[in-house]
Amino acid sequence: MNCTAVVARCLLVFPLIMLLSGCAAVAVGGAAAGIAVAHDRRTTGTVIEDQEIFVRATNLRNADERLKELSNISIDSYNLQVLLTGQAENAQIVEAFSQRVAKIPRVRSVFNEVSIGPEATWSEATSDAYLTSRVKLALFDVGIEGFDPTRVEVTSSQGSVYLMGLLTPTEADAVTEKARFVSGVKRVVKLFEYIEE
């Protein structure tokens, strides 16, 4: 078989492989989401509502040209509570956005942790993503029998680590202590909701 025939076959097969791998990714992603819900202390309905809240808040942010121009806001939704992090050039646009998010159906509260100042650099954003992954990894070493670290939502912004989740007081204390000692963490903000031991 000559080179032209090999290339032609590759060009025909490659899209098929990509299509199949896309289906596999959807199947695997769906299975992973099912496993995550099985371990989550939120109800399945609340998990779905959190996703809807996130999408609605993201759409609000993306539709506001001035907000996009003057800020770099990240959004997290957990148990019908919304966390806003990132940076903005002035407090007024962040407060106005926070109030719009609070009016999304089913939102119980909004934690506005957006700092006022220049946007994070690419290097700072990368450091925050790396910090989040290191904190998540550290939580696997929490020494409580039966503790599931995937029940903790971790977000980082400029060295501050925000922790959300439905935890017992003992779990929350252990998670907070573990996060505090991860290199690069400047501050730990606990936004847990407590359940009985």
Image (cartoon, rainbow, N blue to C red):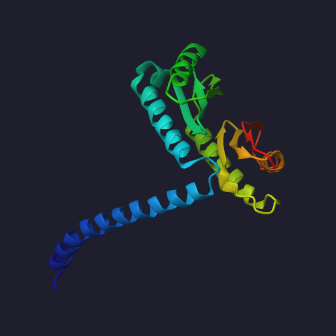
Does 107 sit left or right of 14 as displayed?
A: right
Q: Where residue 150 appears, x then y in whole percent? A: 65, 55
User: Nearest the camera: 25 or 147?
Assistant: 147
Q: Where residue 33 appears, x then y in whole percent? A: 51, 56
Which residue appears at 55% of the width and 18% of the height? 99
Rendered image quadrant of residue 109 = top right
Q: Where residue 17 appears, x then y in whole percent? A: 30, 69
Does 21 sit left or right of 89 as displayed?
A: left
Q: Where residue 193 appears, x then y in whole percent? A: 72, 39
Q: Is residue 20 above or below residue 127?
A: below
Number of numbered labels in the structure image: 0
Residue farthest along the bottom direction in this orientation? 1
Does 161 sit left or right of 95 as displayed?
A: right
Which residue appears at 48% of the width and 30% of the height? 57
Q: Is residue 137 above or below residue 99?
A: below
Which residue appears at 48% of the width and 63% of the height? 31
User: Nearest the camera: 52 or 176?
Assistant: 52
User: Nearest the camera: 4 or 187?
Assistant: 187
Residue farthest along the top direction in this orientation? 92
Rendered image quadrant of residue 116 = top right
The image quadrant where one finds the N terminus is bottom left
User: Nearest the camera: 13 or 21?
Assistant: 21
